[in-house]
Image (cartoon, rainbow, N blue to C red):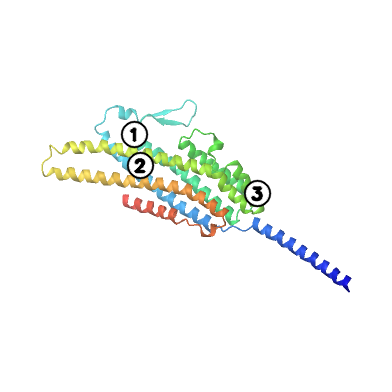
Amino acid sequence: MKWITNRHSGCNYLVLTIVLLLAGYFSGCASISVSTDSRPFEKYRDAFSEVQSSADAVLAVDYKWTYERFLERARESDPSTIQGLILTFSPEDYYLWDLSSDELYIKVKRTQQAFKSLNAAFAGYTSLLAQLASGSLVDVKTFDKLAKELNDNSLSAARALRFTAPEKAVAIFSIAATEAARLYIEKKRRDYLIKIIAENQKSVDLFANKAVEIVKIVAMDIKNEYNNQIKPLVARWPKATKYSRVKVVEDVIALNSEVTALLETLRSLEQSYTLFARKHRELGEALSSDTVSSFDISDLTNMGKRLSSLYKELT
């Protein structure tokens, strides 16, 4: 009887051990392949989409203002103005052209084109992240195609922004992140998604910082243009009659209103790109700490709305 009791006791211990091992195994698997809440990624994508459309519209208005101001000054400019507008062509590239003029409206036009490429690259990136997080992207070949298109866009943006770094350095989806994405598609392990964001952070920061740098340059150029425009207006004042002085004041106030509005849009653009890079980092951190479901993207969404509001004021 004693032997039988001991035998059953041994069996109980064996069963208990197996149960615990199995529980540990399955809980380990669950911790590795936990499904990811894709909603924050979709909100990140949608928030930047609003920033993108507003930024493109705002820069179009900036270009229109600088172009119109250039035409006003061209009436009394010297022959060098027209010479600077003549296209020059590269002997090494059939399709490459340039302008010797450094007029502000040309700089703004180039900036507008560069940011259009950059915004397209960022928008494509946030869309691809959302697809990965949702699990809807199940084919590695499809991902490779999308990643290549995305990196082609980022390369175009890099050229427009006049980066001197090698192509690999400006690919928004790095080689390491691409490999992690392939593994994530196959295994759905959250740590691979975390790695994707971590590996791409450097590229995101690089582009965001370059965008901020160019926005500041444009802001400085607009202030210089203001100084050029305000001088002749102030010079009219001493000779103006008390009736014509009203027109001078109106012109000064109108110029002030235009320039301050333009500078405010540029400030919001700078904040948008800085915020985009920061939110990308925070998204990875939230994923690592398992708090991604409560991740707050409202500040980036609000920035997009603010840009949209500023655009409406300018038009």
User: At 25% across and 38% down in the image, what residue appears?
Assistant: 229
Q: Is residue 141 above or below residue 81?
A: below
Residue density around tag 2, few if under 14, some if 14–19, many if 20 or more, within 10 Å: many
The residue type indicated by label 1 comes to Glu
Give the mark toward the camera: 1 or 3: 3
Which residue appears farthest toward the top when viewing the image? 91
Residue closest to the eye, 124 or 296: 296
Q: Which mark is residue 183?
A: 3
Mark 2 and mark 3: span between their CA atoms?
Answer: 44 Å
Secondary element at image label 2: helix
Q: Is residue 234 left or right of residue 130?
A: left
Mark 1 and mark 3: span between their CA atoms?
Answer: 49 Å
The residue type indicated by label 2 comes to Tyr
Residue closest to the eye, 219 or 73: 219
Q: Which residue is mark 2?
A: 63
Which residue appears farthest toward the front when viewing the image? 2
Q: Which residue is mark 1?
A: 103
Q: Is residue 312 above or below residue 160?
A: below
User: At 27% across and 47% down in the image, what residue appears?
Assistant: 257
Where's residue 35, x and y in %? 61, 58
Q: Is residue 182 left or right of residue 7?
A: left
User: At 36% across and 39% down in the image, what residue appears?
Assistant: 218
